[in-house]
Amino acid sequence: MSLEENKAIILTMCETMNTEDLASRLATMDELLAPDFVEHTQKLEGLESFKQFHTQFTEGFPDINRTIEDVIAEGDKVWIRVKYTGTHTGEFYGVPATYKKITFTSVQIYRMVDGKAVERWSVSDNMDFFRQLGLIEYTEKGKKLFPEGT
């Protein structure tokens, strides 16, 4: 597959993730991710475990929206920078709904083989994510060091 084809696959998947229909999103994953897909950061092995994670995330943040801010392809990899916005209105990882709005950015790297993503690595600011949900608070020293995070 060409670099442009690989980018188009990942962009299609991301665009589909913004639809309201969970079944359509999961079907797109079946189409564009390999059955043995591995998400290294979350330590998820296999497409089914990744789909379960996505379903849990969607239950916690049903209005989540993804905006692709950058896309880069090189060799067998596609890199994207994604801005997420949503509201925590359902349980997520045992945390009951806080009804807080969140915004965070993630950089994701997909490795492609024969038109399917087979691996993903991602980097997100989880501390800020948890702070926005009200699950952690900065100490007084932290508030001085990171005033925009208060």
Image (spheres, helix red, strand yellow):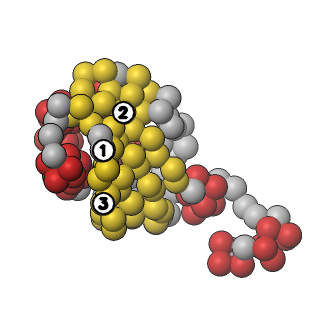
Using the rendered image of the protein, determine whether residue 62 is visible from the camera's viewpoint: no
Q: Which residue is drawn at 71% across and 78% down?
A: 147
Relative vertical location of residue 146 with respect to residue 114 in this rendering, above or below = below
Q: In which quarter of the image is residue 32?
A: top left
Q: Which residue is drawn at 36% across and 52% down?
A: 79
Residue named by callout 3: 71
Which amino acid type corresponds to the residue marked 3 in the rendered image? Val
Q: In this view, does 142 lie to the left or right of 116?
A: right
Which amino acid type corresponds to the residue marked 2 in the rendered image? Glu
Q: In this view, does 9 lie to the left or right of 61?
A: left
Give the distance between the C-alpha atoms of the residues marked 1 and 3, in whole angstroms: 14 Å
Q: What element carries label 3?
A: strand
Q: Nearer the viewer, residue 16 or 86?
A: 16
Q: In this view, does 67 lie to the left or right of 38?
A: left
Q: Quadrant of residue 67?
A: bottom left
Q: Earlier in the sequence, mark 2 or mark 1?
A: 1
Relative vertical location of residue 134 with respect to residue 119 in this rendering, above or below = below
Residue named by callout 1: 75
> How packed is label 2: few (under 14 Cα within 10 Å), some, or many (20 or more)?
many
Using the rendered image of the protein, determine whether residue 73 is visible from the camera's viewpoint: yes
Q: Quadrant of residue 36?
A: top left
Give the distance between the C-alpha atoms of the residues marked 3 and 2, in whole angstroms: 17 Å
> How packed is label 3: few (under 14 Cα within 10 Å), some, or many (20 or more)?
some
Q: Quadrant of the N terminus?
A: top left
